Image: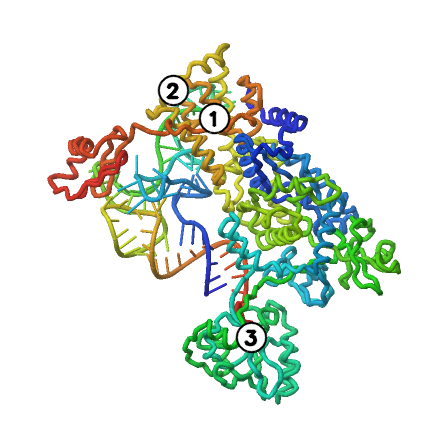
Amino acid sequence: MNPYDHIKIEKKWQKIWESKKPNKVKEDTKKKKFYALIEFPYPSGSGLHVGHIRSNTAMDIICRKRRREGYNVLYPIGWDAFGLPTENYAIKTGIQPSIVTKTNTDIFRRQLKAMGFSFDWSREINTTDPKYYKWTQWIFLQFLKKGLAYKKKMTINWCPKDLIGLANEEVVNGKCDRCGTIVEKKEKEQWILAITKYAERLDKDLDETDFLEKIKIQQRNWIGKSEGAEIDFIINGDENKIKIFTTRPDTLFGVTYIVLAPEHSLVKKLILKVSNKLEIEKYISDIKNKTDIERTDAKTDKTGIELIGVKAINPANNDELPIWIADYVLADYGTGAVMAVPAHDERDHDFATKYNLPIKEIVLADKKEIIEKYGTAITKFKLRDWIFSRQRYWGEPIPVIHCEKCGVVPVPEKELPIKLPKVKNYTPSENGESPLAGIEKWVNTKCPNCKEKAKRETDTMPNWAGSSWYYLRYADIKNNKKFADKKNLEYWTPVDWYNGGMEHTTLHLLYSRFWHKFLFDLGLVPTSEPYKKRTSHGMILAEGGEKMSKSKGNVINPDEIIKIVGADTLRIHEMFMGPFDQSIIWDSNTISGSRRFIERVWKLQEKMTAGESGLSTSHATKIDPLSPKGQSLDLIIHKTIKKVSEDIEGMRFNTAISSMMILLNEFEKIENLNRDQYEIFIRLLAPFAPHITEEIWSNLKNKKSVHISDWPQFDHAKLVENTAKIMIQINGKVRGMIDGNIEMTEENIKKIALNMDEIKKWINGNEIKKVIFVKGKLVNFVI
RNA sequence: GCCGAAGUGGCGGAAUUGGUAUACGCACACGACUCAAAAUCGUGCGGGGAAACCCAUGAGAGUUCAAGUCUCUCCUUCGGCACCA
């Protein structure tokens, strides 16, 4: 037997798979389909991350199992290649982003292939390919047509380092999600996608999905649905009314004052009537100078000022209420105005205490009645519309033209794609314009409508655009008439199982659900939800629990590990490390255990292939040896088949591997292992370690690949244990053990137990008050 | 503050869902092989105790014949949201 040479074996089979393309799939209506998806990677300059390997291996195992269960499995891969890091690298080095992307995807592709993942490489996509982003642009035009893409001058979150506008989802604790710089406010015309139009459905339709509960909860929190009522408060001696939003109309009788957000449009009008105009103006300008972090920090004291001279009237009891403006009321939620009920609401209470406002005991009213009499039932969401334009180069150009006469004119669909022109300087400008604005030849064009001189839009789309629909393109990547043919979509979609990171829950996952629903409404996709099931992997962290990053120099390079121990060992190691859904700290020292396991699997072949006739005879005589513990080996094997099968589906890869280790330990102890039994083991291990198992499988003179062999089925009959160790307990503590039969009766066991010295000792003449009997498990004497 | 997840050996972690706590692996110790080392194989490995036994699953109570698992109170860690009316 040759020593295990992972380099030779892995190269050999990868070459064969490369030429035979065993995982290339066709739409085959006779077969049940299984569409498995992992988040396509951003091809960064630091190469494949061990975290990619974790999630890709997990889904690879599931796919390999499903193929062998008869499914037609689509497991595709591509590149989400637009984005800032590539562009920043281009700025630094002067190398074109498209070239950087090519270099990086080549590296990623090589690394993924070296891991033996069973992707259908014939369906590889790249979001930066004009043939791909033609359709990203096309979908944008559909949004525009339906009025769901609009341009608006607004205060946006501006990252002064990246020189880019950010979506709400990209601002974390007032900082840029990408670089950590404190976000500034900037007035700018922006393209917006009206995701809020879909808020209700994005919330409700989660019910239909099989997403992990924590994912549903996080999305629901983010969408922030709350049901309540709008109630108008008349202003004394003024034709204007204050419309407030409340989730507790039943507390209307406890209202003691009204609060407007400082930015509320009514403030400008009411200020003309008040006696403290100057103070109010000063207050408002002070607020404007605060950053979001300063203003929204719940720990800082609430501030406010009364509009002296105007009063609002409570419609329920005609109380005259003071009107305040305060920073704790947000302009962009609800109506930007609240009715304050200090007896009920903690924030109102704090504020009332601070400013000596009355606190009135409340009697709860009938909610429905209040709404009927004084207001309108309404549902509000925290979700904001999606700021969709970026002032950068490396993204899809937004396909519209600005004409002085005709305004915003969509690029005619037949002119798509609007390709990114080559640029010399990728640096964005301080005034917030995309580098594209500097390319006059590209910018200056003709209006498709009136044929007069016009200018192209120079903003590009965010990196979330291409990933919002990529799973649809996999169904039909070569189509140049549609983003994907309906027939293909009907066969493959929805995605059956999508695994990805929790960090995308309120970004990519939400955005793509939104796009999908929009396309569904246009009749372009067959289902209203894109993904049936969504699971999530835990992150792999560097020592000390930190994120791995190039700048910290704590990145683990998979190439080195593959070279030293092999891809199969790395796969096993990452799956064995710990529970798949939990984050874990990388520890290179423990890989040796997985390598030892793989080597012992390799060595076990000797028992099979040793001797000239070893192979065929052991196949024929099927003896079922007993394990040293006296259990039938068949029983252990069938238990393992059950465990591995169930654990794969439940993503409990760590325990699946441990059960295979246990089986291997048994195999090693047994002299006359028969070939069928060993082959079952190899077939179970194959999804985890595809190279070594394929090699062993062929050494065992099997003609076809192990990866198309049937998935082992366990036999219920063989799972029945008839021997059992029966515990004898005294007061719930184990004091003895009987080797017995699972069918033994209570009387029988009692008789034996009461004769055992170690039991007699404990009973010692005490009265037996009660006996608990669990068949095949235990007898408990209560004394 | 609210929502969610989790606290088990020196370490990563198991535990048929209420029935032998610490599977599997790492590390460690001893032994075999070797001139020697590495690798490999074998044995041991929660704590206390000479033993009988006793004590241990973040802390404390409770339910139960029996609790890592169920209930309550509290503590800690990690994620998410956060002045959302």
Mark 3 = which residue? Answer: A244
Q: Nearer the viewer, residue A275 or A454?
A: A454
**Which residue is located at x 46 percent, y 79 percent?**
A253
Q: Is residue A60 left or right of residue A753?
A: right
Q: Position of residue A549 (x, y in %)?
A: 62, 48
- Comparing marks 2 and 3, which lies closer to the viewer? 3
Q: Secondary structure at mark 3?
A: strand
Q: Which quarter of the rendering shows the C terminus of chain A?
A: top left
Q: Position of residue A483 (x, y in %)?
A: 71, 45
Q: Is residue A508 left or right of residue A131?
A: left
Q: Secondary structure at mark 1?
A: helix
Looking at the picture, does residue A66 appear above or below residue A357?
above
Residue A142 shows in the view: yes
Amino acid identity at mark 2 = Asp
Same chain assignment for discs 1 and 2:
yes
Instruction: Using the numbered discs, state the Cα–Cα distance from disc 1 to disc 2 in whole angstroms.
Output: 15 Å
Q: Position of residue A375 (x, y in %)?
A: 53, 75
Mark 2 = which residue? Answer: A624
- Comparing marks 3 and 1, which lies closer to the viewer? 3
Q: Secondary structure at mark 2?
A: loop
Looking at the picture, does residue A38 appear above or below residue A703?
below
Which mark identifies residue A658?
none
Q: Position of residue A142 (x, y in %)?
A: 71, 54
N-terminal of the two: label 1 or label 2? Answer: 2
Mark 1 = which residue? Answer: A681
